[in-house]
Image (spheres, rainbow, N blue to C red):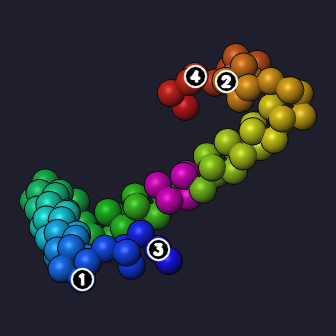
Amino acid sequence: PSPRSCQPHGANEEALRSEIEELRQKDLALDQEIAQLLSEGYSLEELEKHISLLHEYNDIKDAGQMLLGKLAVIRGVTTKQLYPEYDLELSD
């Protein structure tokens, strides 16, 4: 059984209400951020293109991290130790 199934019904319901409220707040904040960007002259198409490019960047970065991890295992070192060899910053 999951931890939630062990909780009293009221506690589980309250946790869900809290989560829903948190998601509503995030939705409102994102709507406000979009409105701000639109007021600064950005178009929805441009924003969607940037979001798409960020997703692509993150996918490529994840693949690179996975490869660095596998290489580190093969060499018996930490991933962090490989960064200087490939001119990477820890913040990369």
Residue 37 % position (x, y): 17, 57
Residue shown at the point (55%, 51%) measured from the top left: 57
User: Which is more foreground, mark 2 or mark 3?
Assistant: 3
User: Which is more foreground, mark 1 or mark 4?
Assistant: 1
Name the residue carrying label 1. Answer: 9
Dot 2 falls on a residue whose secondary structure is: helix
Q: Specify the amino acid type for callout 1.
A: His
Dot 2 or dot 4, earlier in sequence:
2
User: Which is more foreground, mark 4 or mark 3?
Assistant: 3
Name the residue carrying label 2. Answer: 80
Residue 92 % position (x, y): 55, 31
Dot 4 falls on a residue whose secondary structure is: loop
Using a 10 Å C-alpha cutoff, classify the residue at mark 2 as few (fewer than 14 neighbours), some (14 to 19) or many (20 or more): some
Magenta-colored segment: predominant secondary structure? helix
Dot 1 or dot 4, earlier in sequence:
1
Disc 1 from disc 3: Cα separation? 13 Å
User: Which is more foreground, mark 2 or mark 4?
Assistant: 2
Q: Specify the amino acid type for callout 2.
A: Lys
Residue 2, disc: 3
Dot 2 or dot 3, earlier in sequence:
3
Name the residue carrying label 4. Answer: 89
Q: Specify the amino acid type for callout 3.
A: Ser
Contact, mark 2 vs mark 4 (Cβ under 8 Å): no
Residue 60 vertical position relative to residue 15 in the rendered view, above or below = above
Residue 75 % position (x, y): 89, 27
- As for residue 43 lying within the magenta part, the answer is no
Residue shown at the point (32%, 63%) measured from the top left: 47
